[in-house]
Structures are given as C-alpha cells and as structure tokens.
Image (tube, rainbow, N blue to C red):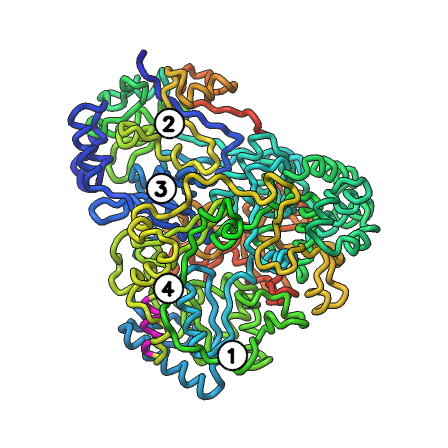
C-alpha cells in the first residue's frame, strides 16, 4: 500500500472542503469553523445572464471571490433554483480565456492578428471610421446588431444619436415569427402562458426541458405532476417528448395539424362561442379557411393518423378553457412560420383560455395593472434613466429591411428587432443601399445567423466591424476592433421587468469588482464611445447608480432595497387573471386599440393580400437520400454563448448528428462513424449518432458547436456548426429559415 | 430516535438538466473533469416511434451496510451517527479498496487532495446549517428531496410513505439510503 502524499493534498486544497472534510460529526470545533465561514461569506442577489431568461440568482461571495451561484430562495417562481448554466457562471467569471483588453486588428481579416490597445485608442479608431462612413455613405450605412438585453439600449443609443435606422436584435434567428404572430393577433407581444394550471398542453417543437427557462420548467412540471396531458409534436424525441406523448410530426407541416384541430373543433362544436363573439373578430374567415382542412387531409400532410388528431383535439377541447397550445420559443422554421404561430394563437382563442388559469395572459406589469381599481395598488411603474437628451436626428433613409412600414410586407417584421439576415445581404449586394460599418454587441452572427461563410464573406466588404463581447467569439475574430465587456457578475444594468401574473422587477448588479480590470460594462463603453464621437449628451447620466435611481424613482422602491433583495414583487398579491372571476370581464390585450383580438388581420391582408387569415403552404419534403435538417437546444448550453465556458464545455464539448437507425443502415453508417453532411455547396464533417429517437426523414444536431475562432480554445473546431449548412434566406416576417434545408450524409 | 438522512429521487420529475451536477461541483470544489454526482440518460429504449427515456441521478448511495466502510483499512470511510457515509481525508491513504468494493462506482480519487472522494450529502457544509444538499436545493425539475426519514413529518419520509420506492442493486444487501421513485415514468 502506497501512502498518499497528504501534504500535496493540503497544498492544492482550498476552502471549506479541506478545512471541514476531516470532521466526523458536527462537533463544537466544526460549528465554529462554519460560523467563521459564514462571517467571511456574503450573498449578493442579482439576475443571471447565462441565457436570456433572466432568472433571479444569489451569488455566494467569500473573500471577494464568487464561490457559488444559487437560485434566489425568496423567488417563488424558481423555488430558489438555477440551472446548470446558471451555476456555471462562476467559471465564466474567472475564465482566463475571456478577452481582457481592447484590441485592434493588425493582420488580414480571419488571420487572428490583433494588438492590444488602450480604450482611448479603440474609441478613437471607431469614432474616426464611423465619421468617415457617415461622410461617404451617410449614417444609415452603419448597422447595429445585438443580443436583446436590458443593456443593449446603450448600444442602440449610439445608432439613435448618429441617425442610423438600422438597429437589429438576434430575434430573427429565434422567436421572431412568434413575435409577429402575437403582434398581429393581440397588438403586443408581452403575452405569456400559465403552464402550472394547465390541464392539457400541446407543444409544437417547444422543448421546455432542454431549452430551459426555470420558472417555465417548474410550471410545465407542476401541470404534468397534477395529471395534465403533454403532447409533443416534434420530428425528434426530445426530453420534453419523453415526459409526454411524442407525436413525430413530418417537418414543416405543423400548420396542417392545427388547421385540422380547428376543423374538428368547429365541426364538433368544441370551442368557446361566447369568447369568440365577445373578444375576437374575423372568426368567420377562419371557419372558411379550415372547412376543408379535415383530419384525413392533415394525416396526409403531417403523417399523424387522423384518429390521433381527432383524439388529441377532443381530449384537449374537453379541458376548455384551462388548456393551451404552446406558441413556441425558437420558431423560424419555414419562410412563413408566423402563419403557423397565428393558427396556434387562434386555437387558443377558440379555447377561450385568455386570462384564465391554465391559459394565456397579458404580462402584469405596472401599466397593465393600473386600469384595474383592485389591482392598481400593486403597480409600481419605473421610469427612464437617461435624463435629458437632445432630439435625435431623423434618419434620412428607411431601414434596409423595410421593417414596420404599413401596407408593405415589412409590416410583418417587428421593428425593434429587424430582419438581421438583411445586413450581410445589403453589404454584399448594396441593396437597397450599401452597409459599410457593422457594430456588434454580445451577438455572434457567424454562428447565430444562417450561412456562416456568407456572413464571413460579407465582413470582408466592410470598412468597419466592431465586436463587443466577453470572449474572442467567431465574429470578434474577424473584427477590426474587439471590445472586452465585463460579465454580468461585474456590472449594473437597467431595471429588468420580468412580470408574469404578478409584477416583478429585477436588478442586475456587480457581485464582485472587475476580475480583469481593463474590461468594462456596456453602459460605460457606449457612454465613453459616445463622448468620443461627439454625441455624449445622449448619455446624460453620471453612472449606473444615478441611472437606476432615476428609473426607480416613480416606483417608490428604494435602490438600496433592490440591491439588498435583487428583485421586487408584491408579496401579498395573488395571481391576477382578468377573466378569473367573470368570463365576460373586460380583458383587452394592452395597446390593442379596438379591444378585439384579430383572428383575421387587416394589417397582414393589406400588406400581403390573401394572408390575413392563416393559409397553408405545402412545403417540399426530403426526397430519396435526403434528410430535413433540424436543430435544437440542450440543457447545458445556451445558443452560441456558453460552449467555451469551462464547466459547461466539460459537460458537453461537442455535438453529433442524430440519424434514425433504419436510415443509417441504408447508408452503411454506424453509431460514432465519421460522416460528411452536404447541403448545396456547403459541407461539414461530423460524427453520426445512430438512434431510434428521430424520424427516418430527418437529422438533427444541437446548436452552437463547430466553432471557428481559435480564441475559443476549448470549443474551437469541435462538432458541427449547423448554420454553416443553412442558406441565409429571409422569411416573410424577417426571420431566418432554420428547417427547410435538406442534407445528404455520407460515411468517410 | 437516531436520525437517518436519505435522498429521494422522483425519476419522473428529473429532466436531466445537470443543475445538480454543476451545483455539486462548485459546492464541493470538485476538480475539473471529476464529479461526485452525475445524472445520465437511461435510454432512449425501444424502437421508433415507441420510446422511453428517463434520467437517473448517480452518486454515493449512503448504504447502511456500506462495503466501503468495511474494507477501509484506516477507518477513513465511516458512517456517522446520522446515517451518512463520509470520508475523513486526513485518514485516507488512497488505497482504493473502497472504490473496488463500492457496487455503485460512486467513488474516485480527488485529483487535488489525493484522497478518495464522493457525495457527502453536503453533510458538513450545508446540512449542519439546516440546508439541504446543493443538488437538492437547485433541482430545476423538483425531482430531489432530502431529509431524516426516521422523522415521519419530513418531506422525505412523506414521499416514501406515499410512493413505492426502489433502491439500486438491492441484491448486494447494502441497504442504500438513496431511494428512487418511478411513479409516472413513461
């Protein structure tokens, strides 16, 4: 027996585990040690940013260092939990691979050659280039793209101040078709589902248990535990499908399923006539649209037996109104996916599940509660933080994507988000005019947008590409200037409204001082850049403390209280459903002038004649030897954001291509084989995962892998980058199109 | 009555999200590439499209008749008065007898300390403070429960009273204190 070198262990060991590991039971000494640890330890409540769900969190800080991130135990919506990604925030914070200094490119684009510079040099470089582009092409030639985030307002402020209309979010790559459908049907997108009280949930692709939003997981799980049926339409057997009834629907045919549901509900009188009459308009046109959309027809389209469609519809309708069809999360599957989302919303309206338990509701922020006398006391409105600012110059040209223009197809594109896929197209084609500068904040077009190589090709035509991020992302790698942002654990952000059935506002605040002293928070980066560009008076706040004090002032909630608790929500308020007591109570969605929900949309009809009511598009299906290529989320990673985070990379460093065992056998492919995936002119190497858990005509991979920036040392070159294979098409509501690519697979 | 701490896993509520896995790593400063607990998928089993898939949390099973305790030559592995199997790192000589004896493959040599390591139910650092283990506290699906099962009022005891529970590898006679409830598993 070899004696273990205890000294070595003691040297490497740190913290309480070693200090306390030897105790057999909780003796007096141990209790003392515990007490000492508690004194040195403090808890800071803040808001997570390991994905975009913005869950509350609690950081345990010992000796100025974050040792653990937990849920906020005072938040009933998460029951004090965080997911794996939330916990792993610590390893992002202290990751030596974060970018630590501003950098300016010194070699050709894509060679990865940069020099470290001072912030002032970086700002000067950007300001000079922006001025040049403004002079030569106009301010609209500079596009701005960011991941939606409370702090991206500071980034967009630069665009506003110089008069560029071309601001974009990442949303076109994710939920945009849903957003369009909500806006066109309800007049606003701030609508959510009350999963926990639902007695039947149908989800079309929404993968609650792998694309994790903690409070929604809690809600769906509560419903299922209480006996709710969960029906999952998905070509792939996801974890969500495993917790319910899997219905392996043929890709791009979901709308047929929902039209057949409506057909059955009308024919068998299974819908809420009073609700339709009192709260909606245009139902007659829907009746007309679905009259021939029989279960027999839908069986041919979807591959789901008509008996199954009828059974699901009847059982679902029997739970009226406490049942819902999920409207989706990452939704841009087809060019006109918004029509499928519209149909889903209409089914929900037919169920009369608006503003009742287990249905959909308007998120209960202060502005929504104020008109209700018995609820107004819970409304604590927040205000703006910027302070006085000069009038912004009016852009002299329209947006490159035509978003938001009434009477044109652009009306379908949510103007706050834009069709981000248009940026590379306008760079390359100079239509409707050329984009010469692209500023990117916490967004990674190379991996998050479709057709990676086309995105990179577009970069090469730019006079200026700037990326602000925490890592040397694949887009940063091609940029002229790279700005190192600090992490969410080191910065303040504007107040975050996370209201559900009760109001809730949250704070994101520094948990520890900057780990890398030359990184900065976004608010400071864009305030300082604004000053350098001569537009500093658009940032007339001293610091975030002042900004947040201004925001909180109308609410009467003290800043110190927010810092102490991390969030505010009225403890004594019960979930408020506008139709909870009286099914005929006033319950118009906010911002909806007429008060009626639009089953038929005049706005859509005006823009695209014939489309005011959802119309089925029969999309092609894969031919012999082809597979529909679909992608999805996994519980331990977020989009393209976390694949280089040490602990998460360790849990899942790569992905593989799921292929049905029967299809694989035909191609001579065995589990673990090296393969090449081909889509048009693009190819990608990968590894096959041969499985029963997918339709034979479909292949799947988890998104966000196959990274091309060598600066992401852990994630670089590992796995399949799905977006390399998908063409950059722009859908009708400005969405990218994720699920219309057919691929071929061969063994190598 | 003496305490008996136990963990209850409601398999139907586990979504395999690995929140437990990561929380444990930070709570217990488990070195890179090593884990005291992990929750692998069981399945998918079956043939397309009739499939089943669930997740089973793996960790020390906190056996009443713990083979690791029996074989440990230095008494580094021991069971405390609350029924929790622990490792005294000061006494562990790294002989790995316990690793061989464990039917659940729940032990490993900690790359930092050189001592054998495993799940401790967070006994010293959380349970003593009245908290539940890190994994239980952060379980997103709500699948995990923990408590003194000799106290019939504890949430853990109530679950055991309500549902039929199983232990892993009962044929070894180890009498584990981690219980798996399969109610509702498809």
Q: Which of marks 3 and 1 is nearer the N terminus?
A: 3
- Residue at the far bottom: name it: A136
Dominant secondary structure of the residues highlighted in magenta in the image: helix
Q: For the residues marked 3 and 1, what is the alpha-carbon distance in whole angstroms?
A: 44 Å
Q: The residue tagged with tag 1: helix, strand or loop?
A: loop
Read off the residue under disc 3. A70
Can you tell which quarter of the image residue A36 is in? top left
Tell whether A401 sits left or right of A153.
Answer: right
Q: The residue tagged with tag 2: helix, strand or loop?
A: loop
Q: Where is residue A602 in the image (x, y as percent from the top left)?
A: 71, 64
Chain at numbered mark 1: A
Which residue occupies 25% across, 56% down? A513
The reply to whether label 3 and label 1 mark residues of one chain is: yes
Read off the residue under disc 1. A435
| Residues shaded magenta | A524-532
Can you tell which quarter of the image residue A616 is in? bottom right
Read off the residue under disc 4. A385
Q: Earlier in the sequence, mark 4 or mark 1?
A: 4
**A530 magenta-colored:** yes
In depth, the one of A615 and A276 nearer the eye is A276
Nearest to viewer (mark 2 / mark 1): 1
Q: Residue B60 carries which label?
A: 2
């Amino acid at each position: 027996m070899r004696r273990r070198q205890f000294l070595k262990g003691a040297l490497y060991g740190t913290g309480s585990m070693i200090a306390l590991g030897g105790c057999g039971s909780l003796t007096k000494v141990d209790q003392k040690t515990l007490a000492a640890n508690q004194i040195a330890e403090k808890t800071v409540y803040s808001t997570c940013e390991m994905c975009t769900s913005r869950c509350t969190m609690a950081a345990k800080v010992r000796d100025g260092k974050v040792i653990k991130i937990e849920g906020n135990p005072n938040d009933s919506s998460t029951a004090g939990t965080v997911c794996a990604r939330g916990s792993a925030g610590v390893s992002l914070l202290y990751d030596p691979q974060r970018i630590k200094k501003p950098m300016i490119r010194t070699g050709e684009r894509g060679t990865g050659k940069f020099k470290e510079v001072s912030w002032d040099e970086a700002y000067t470089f950007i300001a000079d280039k922006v001025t040049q582009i403004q002079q030569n092409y106009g301010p609209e030639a500079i596009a701005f793209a960011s991941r939606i985030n409370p702090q991206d307002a500071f980034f967009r402020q630069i665009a506003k101040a110089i008069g560029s209309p071309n601001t974009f979010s990442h949303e076109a790559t994710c939920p945009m078709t849903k957003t369009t459908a909500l806006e066109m049907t309800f007049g606003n997108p701030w609508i959510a589902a009350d999963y926990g009280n639902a007695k039947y949930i149908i989800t079309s692709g929404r993968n609650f248990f792998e694309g994790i939003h903690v409070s929604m997981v809690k809600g769906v799980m509560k419903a299922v535990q209480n006996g709710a049926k969960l029906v999952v339409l998905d070509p792939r057997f996801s974890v969500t499908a495993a917790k319910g009834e899997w219905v392996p629907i043929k890709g791009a045919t979901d709308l047929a399923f929902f039209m057949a549901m409506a057909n059955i509900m009308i024919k068998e009188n299974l819908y809420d006539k009073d609700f339709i009459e009192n709260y909606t308009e245009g139902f007659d046109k829907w009746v007309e649209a679905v009259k021939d959309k029989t279960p027999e027809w839908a069986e041919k389209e979807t591959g789901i037996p008509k008996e199954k469609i009828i059974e699901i519809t009847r059982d679902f309708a029997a739970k009226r109104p406490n049942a819902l069809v999920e409207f989706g999360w990452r939704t841009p599957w087809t060019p006109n996916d918004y029509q499928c989302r519209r149909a889903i919303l209409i089914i929900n309206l037919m169920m009369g599940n608006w503003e009742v338990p287990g249905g959909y509701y308007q998120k209960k922020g202060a502005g929504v509660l104020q008109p209700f006398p018995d609820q107004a006391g819970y409304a604590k409105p927040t205000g703006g933080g910027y302070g006085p600012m000069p009038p912004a110059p009016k852009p002299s040209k329209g947006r490159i994507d035509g978003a938001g223009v009434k009477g044109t197809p652009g009306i379908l594109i949510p103007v706050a988000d834009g069709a981000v896929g248009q940026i590379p197209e306008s760079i390359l084609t100079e239509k409707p005019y050329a984009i010469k500068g692209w500023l990117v904040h916490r967004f990674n077009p190379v991996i998050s947008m479709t057709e990676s190589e086309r995105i990179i090709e577009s970069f090469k035509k730019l006079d200026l590409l700037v990326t602000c991020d925490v890592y040397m992302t694949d887009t940063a790698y091609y940029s002229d200037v790279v700005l190192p942002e600090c992490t969410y654990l080191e910065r303040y952000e504007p107040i975050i409204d996370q209201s559900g059935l009760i109001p809730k506002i949250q704070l994101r605040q520094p948990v520890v001082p900057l780990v890398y002293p030359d990184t900065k928070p976004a608010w400071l980066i864009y305030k300082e850049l604004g000053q350098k560009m001569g537009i500093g008076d658009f940032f007339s706040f001293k610091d975030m403390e002042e900004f947040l004090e201004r925001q909180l002032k109308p609410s009467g909630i003290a800043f110190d209280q927010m810092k102490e608790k991390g969030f505010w929500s009225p403890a004594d308020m019960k979930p408020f459903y506008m139709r909870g007591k009286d099914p005929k109570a006033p319950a118009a969605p906010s911002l909806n002038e007429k008060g009626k929900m639009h089953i038929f949309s005049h706005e859509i009809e005006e823009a695209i004649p014939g489309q005011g009511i959802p119309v089925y598009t029969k999309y092609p299906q894969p031919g012999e030897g082809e597979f529909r290529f679909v992608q999805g989320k996994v519980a331990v990673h977020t989009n393209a954001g976390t694949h280089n985070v040490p602990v998460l990379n360790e849990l899942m460093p790569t992905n593989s291509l799921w292929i049905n065992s029967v299809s694989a056998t035909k191609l001579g492919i065995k589990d673990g084989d090296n393969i090449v995936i081909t889509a048009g002119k693009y190819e990608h190497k990968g590894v096959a995962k041969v499985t029963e858990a997918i339709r034979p005509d479909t292949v799947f991979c988890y998104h966000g892998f196959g990274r091309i920036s060598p600066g992401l040392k852990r994630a670089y070159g590992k796995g399949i980058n799905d977006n390399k294979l998908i063409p950059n098409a722009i859908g009708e509501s400005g969405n990218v199109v994720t699920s219309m690519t057919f691929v071929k697979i061969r063994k190598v | 009555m003496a305490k008996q701490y136990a963990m209850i896993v409601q398999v139907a509520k586990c979504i395999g999200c690995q929140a437990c896995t990561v929380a444990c790593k930070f709570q217990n400063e488990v070195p890179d590439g090593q884990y005291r607990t992990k929750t692998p998928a069981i399945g998918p089993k079956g043939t397309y499209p009739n499939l089943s898939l669930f997740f089973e949390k793996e960790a020390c099973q906190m056996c009443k008749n713990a083979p690791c305790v029996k074989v440990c030559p230095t008494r580094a592995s021991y069971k405390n008065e609350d029924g929790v199997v622990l490792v005294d790192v000061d006494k562990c000589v790294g002989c790995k007898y316990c690793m061989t004896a464990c039917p659940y493959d729940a032990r490993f040599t900690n790359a930092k300390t050189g001592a054998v390591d495993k799940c401790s139910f967070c006994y010293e650092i959380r349970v003593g403070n009245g908290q539940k283990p890190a994994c239980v506290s952060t379980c997103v699906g709500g699948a995990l429960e923990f408590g003194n099962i000799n106290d019939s009022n504890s949430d853990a005891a109530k679950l055991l009273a309500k549902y039929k529970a199983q232990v892993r590898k009962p044929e070894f006679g180890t009498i584990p204190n981690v219980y798996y409830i399969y109610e509702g598993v498809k």
